[in-house]
Amino acid sequence: ADEIKHKDFCVDEFNTNQLQTEKKEREKQDLIAKIEDLEMTIKALTEAIDTLKAEIAEMQVQLKRAGEDREKENKEFQTTVADQRETQKLLKAALGVLADFYKKSEAASLMQKQEPVGPPPPAGFEKYEKNAASGGVMSMIEQIISDAKAMEAEAIRSEEDAQKAYEDFVKETNASIEAKSKDIVEKTEVRAKAEEELVETKESKEAVMLELEQLSNYNAQLHQSCDFVLKNFDLRQTARDEEVEALKQAKAILSGAKFEEFLQSA
């Protein structure tokens, strides 16, 4: 009876040990898969964060360069406008001087009473030449002044366009930097949670590994305790049954209950 109980105990314990081992193996595989997934997630988040940081750094460089270029362009604009205004100022002054000169020259020529040598020129000819000379020079100066004003106006328009483009670029770039910075914060938080979960998952895996080790050790103990019983149980039971039967027959013979049958069989 004790041997039967021991055999039943061994069978039950082996079955339980196998079921628990299979369950823990599944848990281990699930945890390993989860660890790999978390590690991939953390790696992807780290790469994304590094990329965002690099993009922000590049944008900041572009902002700096754009600011330097804008400053340089503005200085050139200031120089161009100053030059054109100075040109206009000087030419206007020259125009005034020439106007006074030609007026005085015309007045002096009218006061001359000396008759010219040779036949008199056609009426109005001398006056026409002077007027033509004075008018040509002054027209040229006035044209240069007009060109200078046009160049100044064009420089002002270009400066306004460049300034607006720079301000739009700064606004858009700062908005992009802000968005990327926010994305970095969010991804960093997600990564921190994933890293925390990874630590917990690794701890869970270690605990499962320890349980599997304990189950394996117990299985080894069961083999030491049960292998002989399980392997020899049927033989021992058969031998025991035969032994019981022999004892019964011997008892019957000794009691004389089957003495005659015994003689006949002999």
Image (spheres, grey):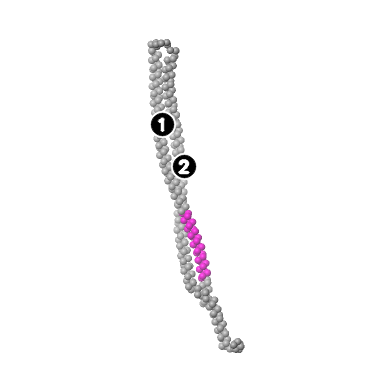
Residue 29's place in the image compared with 189, above or below, is below
Helix, strand or loop at label 2? It is helix
Tell me the quarter of the image containing the C terminus.
bottom right
**Which kind of residue does numbered mark 1 sit on?**
Val
Q: Are marks 1 and 2 in contact (CB under 8 Å)?
A: no
Instruction: Answer with mark 1 or mark 2, whichever residue precedes in sequence.
Output: 1
Q: In the visual, does 86 lie left or right of 3?
A: left
Residue 262's place in the image compared with 19, above or below, is below
Q: Residue at x 45, y 31 (%)?
A: 154
Gap between marks 1 and 2 measured at Cα: 30 Å
Judging by the rendered image, the residue that carries numbered circle 1 is: 81
- Look at discs 1 and 2 and give the one toward the viewer: 1
Residue 53 x %, y %: 43, 48
Residue 73 x %, y %: 41, 36
Per the rendered image, the range of residues in magenta is 13-42
Judging by the rendered image, the residue that carries numbered circle 2 is: 172
Q: Is residue 39 visible?
A: yes
**Which kind of residue does numbered mark 2 sit on?**
Glu
Magenta span: helix, strand or loop, mainly? helix
